[in-house]
Amino acid sequence: MSTDVLDLLASSPVFGSLGHEELEVLATRFSPISAPGGSTLMTEGEAGDGLYLLTAGRLRAYVSIGEAPSPVGDIGPGELVGEMALLSDEPRSATVRALRDSDLLFMSRADFEDLVASHGAVLMAVTRLLVDRLRDAIRGVRREPAAKTVAVIPLDPAVDVGGLADALARDLDDRAIIIAESAGGSSLPTDLHVVEASHDLVIYLGNLEDEEWTRRCVRQADRVLLVADATADPGQRPIERILGEIEPSVAPAVDLALVHSRGGFPSGTSRWLEPRNVGRHFHVRADNQNDVSRVARFLTGKAVGVVFSGGGARGFAHFGVYRALQEAGVPVDAIAGTSFGSAIGVLLAMDLSYEAAIDSLRRTTVDSGSLIDFTFPAAALSKGTKISDRLRSELGDIAIEDLWLPFLCVSSDLTIGEERIHTSGAAWRAVRSSVAIPGIFPPMTSVDGHVLVDGGVIDNLPVDPMVRTMDVGSVIAIDVRARTDFSAENLADDGALSGWQVAFKRLNPFSESMSVPRMVDVLLRSTEVASADPEAEPDFVFRPPVQDFQVLEFKSWEAITDVGYRHAFERMEEWEGEGRRLPKG
């Protein structure tokens, strides 16, 4: 029995919980096999002859939708494939192909059935895997496995791609290795599976002047990171032809890193994205290790996404939680927000300091007076000029794709009844759409002519868009929606309510005031309760106790911020006591 096989099984998420004796028996039933890049491991509809455990490389599963196979997800090292056909005794449910040269362990149907009959723990381990996959399928959310190999390809001679690779490796300590073109020629190590197994990330360093070497790097990569000088021409480079040579169904995902060697804010990112099919893009300041660390976490599946809910003035508690996360050393790599949470998120995505961000929002909501400029209520109580002007004043012409941190916000598309996820275009317009509370602020119009209102109508805690769009490793959600601050006192059983009577009692000093929900509060509250809870489970959730504050009580911003700050440390201490630790940079 191979010690390597035993070690692989012990470190597998599927079989790692088994005892040593069971692992030894399991190891005797597995046989090592190899699958060249581009080869088909199994075909949808054929009989299942066994199951596979991927030890090195990357696979992709496809299902038939119409005439063409459609990819449903990637499979990374440590994951099991083919087990469903063995348990159900039905044909293969998907076609699986190797995206690059891959090593696997294979167990035949006969060995599997014999093993399950004598060792029930093995069946339990596989069943748990199936339950997890079913739960993800029902929720429609699946996190892709982290890349084990990345080809870093320079697009410009001026870019110090070697320095960037060194910085990435340093950030990962001894868990990363760089494989560059050797002086003796273009060759790759023969024991790549050993190299991969002993490192979190293998970086293949491309060369602008050697296309053949770069081609080999790309063929071994789970992801490709194109690195360009942000001040250079954004057009496609000749070396990018290599990406077009790969069959699209097995092509690696492509990211873009724009390196900024000068001061100032990024601009013109859309011109880089238009001619390229990239999944993610990063802005990296040449002298900023935090930017490099963020890229490293994204590449290794350890990026941290933070989600801010809507909630009006209660959203200032987001700042308190954010400050606590900073002091605890928790990185924030991507941000998503709804309604007031989007206004906070975009400021932090600009990489403003905590103090500068909170000052900006205070100027918008407190120092400049009410956001509501009352008008005849044809479409809304407010004309909308104040809030639009203030957002433009604070955000200027910044586009979402030019923000230092990946950012998205959501609005509700009333034209088609779906949420709209904003990941590009003018930041102020996206935030203005996300905060367009129905009945209070006029709706916004999208570039395709749809009517957009507050994101909280459909999704007041955008965890699902964060998971689907940002490809982060863990998600921290901050939920400031009130739970118990609405009372039915003084509301009649028959649903009748005279506004004149309420007004008279409030204005008459000799009469007891009637306490009923105000129209503004009803409209705001409706955006909080209308949306469903997220399907994807955040890894950590903060719920600051802000129910004692009104949704338009912006003057209490300091007290609300402090509630969020103190709550965050209380929750972190509780999690620490439970053995749960927030991700650290």
Image (cartoon, rainbow, N blue to C red):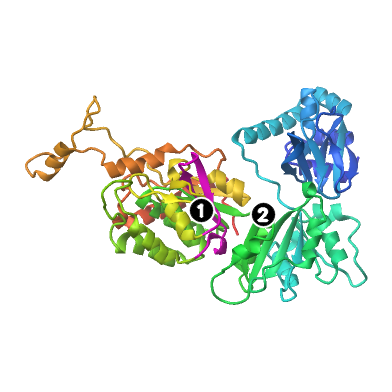
Residue 284 image-quadrant placement: bottom right
Q: Are marks 1 and 2 in contact (CB under 8 Å)?
A: no
Helix, strand or loop at mark 1: loop
Number of numbered labels in the structure image:
2
Instruction: Give the side of residue 518 with respect to residue 48, left or right.
Output: left
Instruction: Give the side of residue 237 with respect to residue 331, left or right.
Output: right
As shown in the figure, which amino acid type bears the numbered disc 2? Gly
Q: Nearer the viewer, residue 132 or 393?
A: 393
Helix, strand or loop at mark 2: loop
* Span of residues in magenta: 398-425
Vertical placement of 82 versus 547: above or below? above
Quickly name the residue at label 1.
447
* Residue 281, horizontal then vertical, whole percent: 64, 60
Lower sequence index among marks 1 and 2: 2
Q: Is residue 415 magenta?
A: yes
Q: Is residue 529 magenta?
A: no
Q: Nearer the viewer, residue 198 or 159?
A: 159
Rendered image: mark on residue 279: 2
Instruction: Give the side of residue 424 with respect to residue 67, left or right.
Output: left
* Residue 372, horizontal then vertical, whole percent: 30, 54
Of marks 1 and 2, the one in the foreground: 1
As shown in the figure, which amino acid type bears the numbered disc 1? Val
Residue at left offset 65%, top offset 65% = 292
